[in-house]
Amino acid sequence: MGSAIPVGIVTFPPPVSGVLAAISRAEAAGVGTAWVPSWPVGPDGLSIVTAAAARTSTIGLASGIAITYPTHPLARANEALVAAELAPGRFRLGIGASHQAEITGRYGIAFGKPLAHLREYVAVLRGMLWDGHVDLDGVHYQVHASLPPMLTPPRPPIVLAALRKNMLRLAGEIADGAMLIWAGPSYVRSVARPALEEGAQIAGRPRPPLIVAASVVLTRDFGTVRRVAQEVFSRYSSLPTYGKMFREAGFPLTAQGQLSDELIREVYIYGDEEEIRQRLVALHLAGADEIAATIRPVADPAREEAAILKVLAQL
């Protein structure tokens, strides 16, 4: 098949113990990376990654994605220093702005101008984690700080959650990777890669990697896939960014606000083991430099996870 495709798993909390166990199983199976997201309310993904760093030795670990607005970037950098020391060379710091409904509705924090907010947020992280110091007098943050003299900046890659063109361009400018969800091969090829490349050209730097997160279901029954996809999307359906993204991809939501069958076929990875492998390869060939799989069990969770982990490791 050629060179290996970088692959990982995405494991959502809660419970924390279940996520840690899943990371250990992925490491034993030979999977490259474990990504742990954070919900707006619930166990913090970066904290779980830090706990996993102390009990693993080879698997890459990444927050995917740590939400920015509720946590000051200097505080986030301080947290990242722990994970970077416990998992040297294995840790990536994934961050994202989340959505206005989550940040303003739940936290009461103004969400205005997320692109400008993230540009300054990354500047603080980059200064502290890469250069060891930061002096920023920005609109959103005023930060003047340095690492203690005995600490060497660990320089973990900083990955930015990005869905639509403007955020992808920003990631191309300032991040060490962009993480994209709910995207199939056509969106990756026609929208995401070009926007990421455009941002990199603006900054005069190489294009950073595009990491595409995809749900994987071990079944050939499309009715089952449809049920799983609609259940998962119900958590995202109130967030308008996704509807806009799907329209831009050419797969608008139905009149009832649900995923169309065409969109599910585009973004979900399903079938038997060989069909799943082929769909993952197709996503890679469309422009996903790395794939992060969320395993969605339907009948026998242990068997299905083991089978999918084997496919991922063989890529």
Image: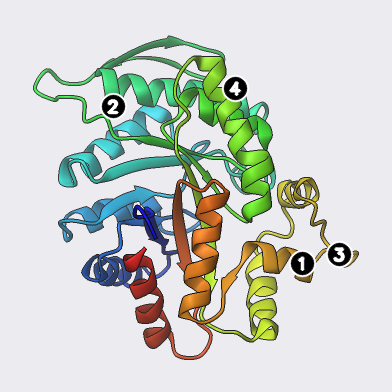
**Spatial distance from mark 2 to mark 4, Cα to Cα?**
20 Å
Instruction: Residue under label 3, please give it.
Output: 254
Q: Residue furthest bottom?
A: 299
Q: Is residue 240 above or below residue 176?
A: below
Between the residue at mark 4 and the residue at mark 3, the CA separation in whole angstroms equals 33 Å
Q: Amino acid at mark 3?
A: Thr
The kind of residue tagged 1 is Glu
| Residue 162: x %, y % from top left | 58, 40
- Among the two numbered marks 2 and 1 on one chain, the one whose residue lies closer to the N terminus: 2
Front one among 89 and 16: 89
Report how far apart the C-alphas of labels 2 and 3 lie in the structure: 44 Å
Dots 1, 3 in contact, CB < 8 A: no
Closer to the chain start, of discs 4 and 3, is 4
For the C terminus, the image quarter is bottom left
Residue type, numbered disc 2: Leu
Q: Which residue is mark 1?
A: 262
The mark closer to the camera, 2 or 1, is 1
**Crowd class of label 3 (few under 14; some 14 to 19; many from 20; radius 10 Å):** few
Image marks 4 and 3: residues in contact by CB distance under 8 Å = no
**Residue under pointer 2:** 129
Classify mark 3: helix, strand or loop.
loop
Q: Earlier in the sequence, mark 2 or mark 3?
A: 2
* Marks 1 and 4 close (CB-CB < 8 Å): no
Across and down, in percent, residue 1 comes to: 39, 60
Identified by mark 4, the residue type is Ala
**Disc 2 to disc 3: CB gap under 8 Å:** no
The correct choice, above or below, for 87 with respect to 42 in the image is: above
